[in-house]
Amino acid sequence: MKHAKSLETNHKYNILMPAILIFLVFFLIANAYTSINHLTVEEEVKRFGIENLYGFYTPKQENALTYNWTGNEAVKILKIKGDVICIPIGNDRPEIEENNVNLKITINNKIKYSYTMNSNDWQLVLINVKEIKDDYIKIKFDADNTWRPIDLLEDSVDERVLGIKVGEIYWE
Amino acid sequence: MKLSNIENTTNRYIFRFIIPLFILLSVIYLILKNIFVVHMYPFNPIFIISVVLIILLSNISIFSFENGLLILLFLACVINSLPVIILNIEIFYPFILFAFLGFVVGSCFKTSGIEIGSFYKDIKFRIFSIFVILFTITITISVLFTILNNFNLFHFKNLEMRICNINVMGNNSLEAMLFSLEMYLNYIITFILFFLLIKRLKITRRFLTKLFYTLFSANIIVFLVSLYQIFINQGFGQQPNWIVSGQINSTMVGPNSFGFFIILNIGIFTAYLFYLGKKHKVLCLLMLLILPLQLLYSGSRTSLLGLAIFALLIIFYFSISILVNLIRKRGKNKNDMLMLAAALLLLVIIPISFSAFILKTDTLENKSILKPVLLERIKGNMEQMQEGNSLPGVSSSRNIVWSQAVNMIKDYPLVGVGIGTFPLELSNYCKLSSVDLRIVDYALNTYLQILAENGIFSFVFFIGFYITLFTIIFNNLRKIHETKNRKFLIIIIFIIITCLIMFNLVSGTNYFEGQILYSFLLTMLLLLSYNLKNNETCEKLRNKP
């Protein structure tokens, strides 16, 4: 009698185990689906309006202008609010006249824009994005000739690898 | 995997998968924390102490598991503010996690040969094991996906894996990974400790006496540090933000974890008051006198609530017990009367009269530090309530944080936003709801946090874990008749129930030290219930003619 009861109990739980396995497969799929479709950083950036995606250092203030240094590569995602995007760019690299910094700006992997920085003055880059049909644009900055203040400036302890300065972007 | 094989499955799962994973992730966490948070090159005392702790605890637990465990518990009480004392920096660095890592590494050396108890014969324990397996699997899957999400690895278009900004406050993928790892390790500690103790620890009266002395000596150190902070230097081992609030943390990470530690210890020493001999009773009474007073200076309101709940449970239980004895005309139970008097006096009358005395006296006017900050906070909250529109201040923004947790649950009910991600997503959701709250904080409600971070399934398994645990314990308790044993267990059950109620207002056990002590208490409760039940059953069988 006891043996029969034990067999019955075991039978009950032999069904339970495949159920657990099916659940785990379902849970894995649910996680993968949510990760790919909803919880990617890019989706979150768009949803919550997070300022930068990656490659930017913390914001700095220069007179009335707020800007971020980039590394050799940086990406921002922005909601399209006009036809022309206006990007203030600058640099502080010592002897930039001899060591020009080549900047490549790519928008949504479609529009490509190149610019050679040969002075440390602020410049305004205007790019027409009328042809982009999405609600958001992804702007990627690639800078060569990066530098570290600790290597080129006396008394500096700053070990960051710096590309260019990007000011507050606006639309026209 | 069959239920009849659950013992082998659980052992293989815990000892061949979860423990190696824990060791690997703890080492990764140790390295990342030192590189990206501590920032000290080339000589880093914090890293050296961590490594020394790992080596020390692993060696001790290789030779003696029991001593390793007692040293771990002692360290869990005393070393948590050490990083601030050594470096005076504002970071969270869990030394005790690395001590636990050493303990786990050392304990794993002899796990195969020894098996104590016959837990798996109990069908309820098998179901309990299934809940443990399911909960740990869901959080393991969650931590893996969360880390990949926060590094943007699911951006399949060009497989860019970068350190991205993941919230409106500028926190990045690396910080998110450390949060996820911390939360995962914090959960997993409970289950590792559980199965290690099941395999290796035999709870005897000798062990319980050793444990008493370990906790008593640790509490003396904690009390001395408290006194030092109250009378001499409040900033000793204290994060700057807590110095401003006037709360003390003694040897813990923060005042709230100190409050949680006090509640656990009040429970432990109340239980010991019943269990050990006269000499120990005096020491227990001494502890029960100083612990509630320290609570007043920790300033933790949730812990005060915990103390009130625990005192009520004790008073209610012993009053009923005395009443039942009187009705059944068994005569007065001297121990119950003593217990009731002690609970009333130490947990209620003395703390309230001390507070009333401090509030009324003028002699401390110039020494604000001597005034218990908890009273000041409660007084402040009452004033705020009278002024109206005071909910965020009184609730420490819980009303805002909880509604954001509910929003997260609505968005991702099945899988949550990712383990350890709640603190970072909070500011995002506040922005979305146009709420002006830019903080990195936990949900201040354990159940909401599990739902928001890990989804409904993990929550169900978490609840299932506790339901089966209590079913086992109450089932065993029915077969334990010796008053001393029974009441020792009941008091520990009361403190666990108190903690479970407190979890409605705090996020878990407040860091690793609380988690280790709480998990130990939980495991001890289960082991002891089996042990005492089996002992009494054996004795009954032996006495049968």
Image: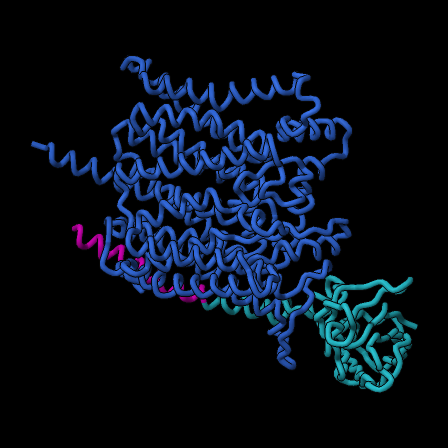
Which chain is in cyan here? A
- Magenta segment includes A8: yes
Q: Residue at x 26, y 45 (%)?
A: B202
Position of residue A153 in the picture relative to residue B325 (left or right)? right
Which chain is in blue here? B
Position of residue B535 in the picture relative to residue B215 (left or right)? left
Nearer-the-camera pick, B45 or B166? B45
- Magenta segment includes B474: no
Task: Name the quadrant containing residue B205.
Answer: top left
**The C terminus of chain A - image quarter:** bottom right
Quick check: can you spot residue B301? no
Q: Which residues are magenta?
A: A1-24
Quick check: can you spot residue B259? yes
Q: Main secondary structure of the magenta part?
A: helix
Q: Residue at x 33, y 29 (%)?
A: B487
Nearer-the-camera pick, B540 or B295? B295
Position of residue B140 in the picture relative to residue B527 (left or right)? right
**Rendered view: B288 above or below A114:** above
